Each structure stands twice: as C-alpha cells, then as structure tokens.
Image (cartoon, rainbow, N blue to C red):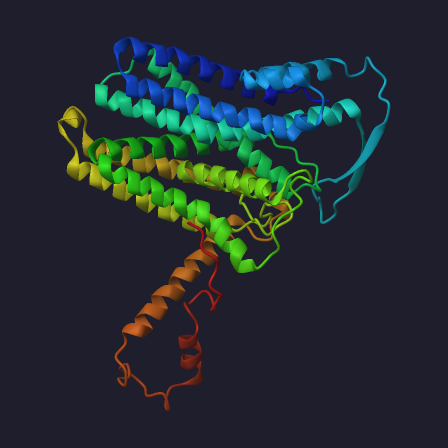
C-alpha cells in the first residue's frame, strides 16, 4: 500500500496558506487597510468552507452518527482530522486482520497490441484510504482555483499598487502559487484516472515534472497578465473576467440542453432535484474557475452518467490555447498603451516579450507531456501532432470558404473555362487544401 503523501501535501498547503493569510490580514488591520483585510479573509474562508462541505459530502458524514467530526468541520479543522484518520488507517495495515476483501480487475498498458487483465485483492483499509485520497484530490482543486488563485491575484495587485513586497505578502504569494500548481497537477492526474479507469495507470516522475513546469508557467503568466491589465484599466477588468467566467460556466449547460438528455439523478440518492441542481452548479462553477487561469484537464459533460467527458478532444485544447494566447497578447498590448508612471522603472517591451515567451514555454511542456510522458499515450486514437495538424486543416477550410464568398458572382477566374477544364483540376479545386480533404466542422471550445 502506498504512503498517503498526496494527503499530507494537500493538508500542508491548506494549513500553511490559511495561517499566512490570517497573519497577513492582521497586518492589514494594524495598517488600517480594511478593504485588503476583508478581501484576504474572503478568499481564505470561502474555499475553506467549500472544502469542509466537500469532505463531509464525499464521506457521507451527514447520514452517520459522528457529531465530533461534524463539529471539527464547522471549526474548519476537517482536513487535519481527515489527514490524521488516513495516517491511522495506513499505520493499522497488517496489524489487524481484514474482515473481508474485494477483488478488482485492472488492465495493464497494452504491449505489442495486447492488454493483460490483472486481478488484485483490495482490503477494507485500502478502500478507505482510496476514498481519502480521492476526497483530498478534489479538495486540492477547490482550494487551488476558488481560493489560492484569487488570493495570488489580489496580493500581486497590492504589490503593484504599493510598489513593494513585504515578507508576509511574499510568503502568502509563494504558498498560493504552489497550491495552484499542485491543484492543477492533481486535476491532470484525476482526469487521467477517470478517463482510463479500466487500466492500471502508473504516472512516472518525468510526467510530474512536465506537468509541474507546464502549469507553473501557464498559471504564473496568466496571473501577471490579469494584474498588469487591472492596474491600468480597473473598470475594464470586470467585463473581461465576467465574460470569461460566463462562457465557461454556461458552456456545459448549453451542451446539455442541446443533447436533450434526462436530468442527472445518479449523483447521490439522498439528494432532491434542487440539491442535485445545486451540486451541478457548483461543479460548473469550479470548472469555470479552473478555465479562468489554465486549461481544465477534466472536461465537464452533464449528459454523461459520470459527468465527465472521457474522450480526448485535441480541437478544444488547440482552440483554447490559441484563444488564450491571443487574449493575453491583447491585454498586454492594452497595458502597454495605457501604462502609468508606476512602471517607468520597468522595460515594458521586454516584460511583454518575457510573458509571451513564458506562455509559449508552458505550451511547449504541455506538448512534451502529451507526446512523450503521458502514461496512457498508447491508448490515444490519434497523436497530439496529428490532432494539431487536423486543426490546421480546419483553418485551411475556413480560408478557402472565405475566399469563395469574396469571389464576384458571374465572373470566372482567369484560365480555363469550366467546360474545358481538365478533370484533375476540377478534383483538386473541390478539396480544401493540398494535404487534406474536406472535414466536418469540429466542436469548438473556448
């Protein structure tokens, strides 16, 4: 049985960030900055409450007689208690005889075209520990994108306005960035295990390194771009953020209404229709919060029984990163045009170039991960390079259709007439480009 290191890391980041935020809010109070104090506490307490609710919901404590555990959750000490409980379960393995075991069947990664199925006995203690790992994987994502990401953006914005970084603020920013990157990493691993649940997934250290570098550059660049833009155009940052959030929040619901699927009722038997709607809204809210800062590896699909889209869509990923790169470049251009005197000691063109290069580096590590380090790359129906090539062929189709619409009606292009035109020429003109034939319009996602 594996050591519950992921649980320990999640609880350590949660405790460290909460402690640093409470200390920083006390310094804001002593300095008389009531607004910064309130926002710092808001981005600390709201995700903490959501984490307590998630742990209570996954472990189903409301239907069990555990008043002490519920009290500790109310006191915002639930993650610490769950961590101690997980370590107690891990320490008791081998000392107490298992009353019963269950048998699981997992496929190994196919080698030479064959995938062997392996049976393994899972004891009661290992099953409980698996539940704890799954719960903390989800709470890490909630803490990262509903708490740490807004917290990091706020503190960096205060640093820009005050032209300085204090020790407390710098410590909180570093911990928040680590929490966001770790939450994005857990989101990637969670997506892999959900999509390939029938297989025994073994994530190697090089894959963790690629994901860490990919997410670090992507998230840090995104936060800096938003802070720079908001520092010069305070009134326009709200429409930009709301538009991004509403697009990603409403997109799963629009697909669900178009599919004409029945309302999901298999989330939890004890939930009513109103409770199920609230849970789905919270899920899409978290999904929108993730996509505000980085690509969400877990794609929500409300019409699916598991609420997760298990297909690998390279089009969505390619369109997302192209649109996000264009958006970041546009926001940096607006910042460069309207920058104020607080940036007179900064080489603005060099900063813009560094941020764009950093985002390009993030895309590079993402390509390396999916092309070489993904643990289930042998199961891909098509490689990522082929998916990006197909996406580029779509651009050829769009350019071809635009040129045909701009051609004057009733006027033939110079050259042979249609009657005297060879058949080979007619066949070549009906295709979209020289390397690919006509393809169906893929489903966009941005």
Estimate the x, y position of residue 187 in percent, counting from the top left: 54, 34
Residue at x 42% of width, y 51% of height: 319
On the image, the x and y values in percent for residue 107 come to 74, 41
- Is residue 393 depicted above or below 304 in this figure? below
* Residue 354 seen by the camera: yes
The image quadrant of residue 8 is top right
**56 lies left or right of 414:** right
Left or right for 356, reference 76: left
Residue most toward the top?
Answer: 30
Residue appearing at x 65%, y 33% in the figure: 202
Is residue 392 rendered to the left or right of residue 192? Answer: left
Q: Residue 39 placed where, x, y %?
A: 35, 23
Q: Name the foreground residue: 78 vs 125.
A: 78
Q: Is residue 227 above or below residue 368?
A: above
The answer to which quarter of the image holds residue 333 is top left
Is 88 drawn above or below residue 109 in the view shown?
above
Q: Which residue is at 71% across, 42% downward?
A: 198
Image label count: 0
Quarter occupied by residue 399:
bottom left
| Residue at x 32% of width, y 74% of height | 404
Q: Is residue 419 left or right of residue 252?
A: left
Q: Nearer the viewer, residue 373 or 309?
A: 309
Q: Quadrant of the N terminus?
A: top right
Can residue 82 be seen at all in this image of the molecule? no
Question: Picture coordinates of residue 36 (x, y %)?
Answer: 30, 20
Relative depth, front residue between 189 and 413: 189
């Amino acid at each position: 049985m594996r050591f519950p290191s992921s649980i320990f890391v999640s609880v350590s980041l949660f405790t460290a960030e909460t402690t640093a935020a409470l200390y920083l809010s006390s310094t804001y109070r002593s300095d008389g900055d009531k607004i910064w104090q309130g926002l710092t506490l808001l981005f600390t307490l709201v995700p903490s409450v959501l984490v307590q609710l998630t742990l209570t919901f996954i472990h189903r404590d409301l239907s069990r007689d555990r008043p002490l555990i519920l009290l500790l959750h109310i006191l915002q000490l639930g993650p610490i208690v769950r961590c101690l409980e997980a370590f107690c379960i891990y320490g008791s393995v081998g000392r107490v005889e298992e009353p019963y075991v269950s048998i699981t069947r997992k496929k190994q990664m196919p080698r030479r075209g064959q995938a062997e199925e392996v049976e393994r006995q899972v004891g009661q203690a290992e099953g409980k520990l698996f539940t704890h790992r799954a719960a903390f994987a989800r709470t890490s994502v909630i803490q990262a994108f509903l708490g740490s990401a807004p917290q990091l953006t706020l503190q960096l914005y205060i640093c820009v306005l005050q032209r300085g970084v204090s020790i407390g603020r710098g410590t909180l920013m570093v911990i928040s960035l680590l929490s966001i990157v770790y939450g994005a990493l857990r989101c990637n691993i969670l997506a892999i295990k959900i999509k390939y649940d029938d297989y025994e997934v073994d994530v190697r250290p090089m894959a963790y390194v690629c994901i860490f570098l990919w997410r670090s550059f992507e998230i840090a660049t995104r936060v800096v771009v938003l802070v720079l833009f908001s520092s010069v155009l305070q009134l326009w940052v709200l429409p930009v953020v709301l538009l991004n959030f509403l697009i990603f929040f409403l997109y799963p619901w629009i697909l669900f209404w178009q599919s004409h699927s029945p309302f999901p009722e298999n989330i939890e038997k004890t939930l009513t229709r109103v409770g199920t709607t609230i849970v789905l809204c919270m899920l899409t809210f978290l999904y929108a919060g993730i996509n505000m800062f980085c690509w969400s590896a877990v794609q929500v699909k409300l019409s699916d029984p598991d609420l997760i889209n298990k297909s690998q869509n390279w089009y969505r990923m390619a369109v997302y990163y192209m649109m996000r790169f264009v958006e970041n470049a546009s926001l940096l251009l607006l910042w460069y045009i309207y920058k104020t005197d607080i940036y007179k000691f900064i080489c603005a063109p060099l900063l813009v170039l560094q941020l764009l290069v950093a985002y390009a580096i993030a895309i590079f590590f993402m390509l390396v991960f999916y092309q070489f380090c993904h643990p289930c790359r042998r199961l891909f129906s098509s490689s990522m390079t082929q998916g990006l090539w197909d996406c580029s062929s779509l651009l050829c189709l769009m350019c071809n259709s635009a040129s045909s619409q701009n051609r004057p009606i009733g006027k033939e292009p110079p050259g042979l007439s249609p009657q005297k035109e060879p058949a080979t020429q007619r066949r070549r003109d009906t295709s979209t480009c020289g390397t690919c034939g006509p393809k169906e319009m893929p489903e966009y996602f941005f």
